[in-house]
Amino acid sequence: TGLRARMAASPLCDGPGLAREIETAVRNLWTDWCGRQRQAGEKAVQSQFEEAIQAFQSGNFPRALSLSDAVLAASPDSTDARHLRGVAAYKLGRLAEAVGDLTKAIAGAPDRADFRWNITPMLRGLGRLAEAETHGKEAVRLAPQSPEAHNNLASVYKDLGRAAEAEAHLRHALTLRPDYSDAWSNLSWTLSLAGNAREAEAAARRAVELNPRDANALNNIGTALMQQDRLPEAADCFAGAVKLKPDFAIAHSNYLFCLNYRTDMTPDAIFEAYRDWDHAHAAPLMPSNPVHFGSRNPERRLRIGYMSPDFRYHAVSFFIESLIAAHDRERFEVTCYAEVANPDAVTDRFKRHAARWRSTVGLSDAEVADMIRADEIDVLVDLAGHTSGNRLLTFARKPAPIQVAHMVGSGTTTGLSAIDAFLINEALLPMGAERYFAERPIRLSRMPHVYVPPEAMPDVAPLPALRNGFVTFGCFSRPARINEDVVKAWTRILRSVPNSRLVMNSKPFREEENCAAWHARFAAAGLEPGRVKLVYTSPQPRTWDAYGTIDIALDPFPHNAGTTTIEALWLGVPVVSLADRPPVGRFGASILGSLGLDDWVAHDVDAYVARAITAASNIEALSRMRSGLRAKFAASPIGSDAAGLAREVEDAYRSLWRAYCARGKA
């Protein structure tokens, strides 16, 4: 009678209890399986991440990026994978993307110093220097013993013009890691900018010892050697850098600059070198059938694009701002494409002169070309040539139907087959010399710029010879222009003008060793000690004041000075120039001719020497000339009438546009 009840109360009749126990067993099995799967997945993800690191270290950045994406798909919160993806994107030139990745990584791990020092150069590349400095300083705070943190912060300070801080951080990085080749290379560049050419050379050579395949360091040696006027050695270094890195267009441009200063190179050989640059870097980028938008109406309002890294306080801005400001806005719409990472008050003025302002900082040449094409620019004008920060490889992609080079940049041909025309005048490029240009010369009736002196320019000082009792000659140009022929000519002048002196003022003369080498050169030419003074005045207003110690300026040859000749004239100092190979050897002739001072231009060395001696023989005439030279300059084509220049330049643009439209109809 009691068995059923006993049975009913037993486990045999407890279905829910049995279900719970079976569920627990199944859950345990499931949990165990999931754990094994998770471990296997984690191992797979870790394996992928390690493979991504290996790909990055071997230089396969696209694969590193792809594998990082796979890791992030499985582990979205992995800051290490996000960081690796960012540095791979940076290596591929995708700066904005890289900064986005590093910003997320830092948000997940704000105390990781390596994340901070890696985002620093990315922000620097985008021109976001204030943010770059913030992250760089934080990296140094988090990891004061990290040489990478100090090295990357130093690069930001270099761009900000704070050379002393940059040098301090680089030297500290090298105390932490004496074999850090990148820091040696960066120190070399910083020292070169400051004018410490021999120290810069030594630092760059140390970088090459540590890393013989460091093309940047080899380029830096070339720059330091060029500052010392050791041109053949410099050219060999630039050529060696290009050999190590065939797409190193900057080093190849430096090679071209070096050739222009040399006396052992013919104009034909130099021009061939420019064409070689085009063949190596630019011509392969030219589209077979460039696409341009906008109607081919020959008389419509034209869109003009000016491209420059110098829309800031820079010598180029003194010559080009007035032209851009004077354009007829009803007939021409101006867009400025600015490679300006550190804008200033001058930048703000350029922005006001333009209908549109486009920053190109951080963008690839291809991206800038796409921007220009989308803006439907009709005439694109280069204001840089082969100088630092140029965008010649944007021009190579032919983003505008008409492309023009302006002589204000590097003063001579770009060598690019993609550029149609070159704005110049006949004094710079006499008839028959157009064979030295890849572009079609557009010879204006005047130099294609008007000089507007900066506000800090001092008044004209009295003639120094009146108080000194002797004549002081001077040259404030870079030493790379001063070759043995120039040294011999200047020695002849000083030996023929009793008690005369020569002042040379340039950055490399801040180094005693460099000064000793230059004094030895003059002594070897036969000039007694004490006749030559080598100085470096800084900041710039001190250099302008130093023109007050000069009676007559001597222009180097075969590569004349440009900005320093104009500054000398504005400050009342006449210039003796030798017209040599076009166009870089005729800057002086063109500038002086603009002021009606053709009689200060010689056409051979003997006449150059004689003209300087004659000028020094009449102190009263020099004094009268000095007092009236600024007014003469201000009344000249390069000292006034920006509106007249703008009309002539606009006519040149219109003529080129009409010809383009006519070709389309044909």
Image (cartoon, rainbow, N blue to C red):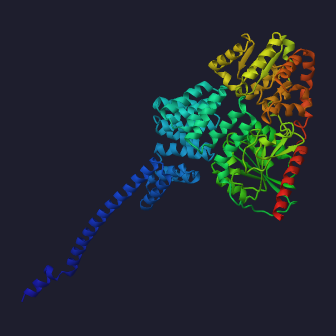
Q: Above or below — where is 56 with respect to 583?
A: below
Residue 436 at what x, y percent from top left? 77, 41
| Position of residue 540 in the picture relative to residue 637 (left or right) | left
Residue occupying the far left of the picture: 1
Q: Quadrant of residue 27?
A: bottom left
- State whether residue 123 is above or below residue 5: above
Quarter holding the N terminus is bottom left
**29 sits to left or right of 173:** left
155 lies left or right of 507: left
Q: Can residue 422 be spotted in the picture? A: yes
Viewer-closest of 443 and 630: 443
x then y, percent, for residue 468: 83, 12
Q: Is residue 535 above or below residue 212?
A: above
Q: Where does residue 389 sit, x and y in percent of width and height?
A: 67, 42
Query: Outermost residue, bottom direction?
Result: 1
Q: Is residue 588 left or right of residue 627?
A: left
State which quarter of the image contains the C terminus. bottom right
The image quadrant of residue 504 is top right
Q: Residue at x 47, y 29 (%)?
A: 175
The residue depicted at 65 percent of the width and 52 percent of the height is 284
Q: Is residue 189 visible?
A: no
> Measured along the vertical axis of the image, is residue 580 above or below residue 28?
above
The residue shown at (10%, 87%) is 4
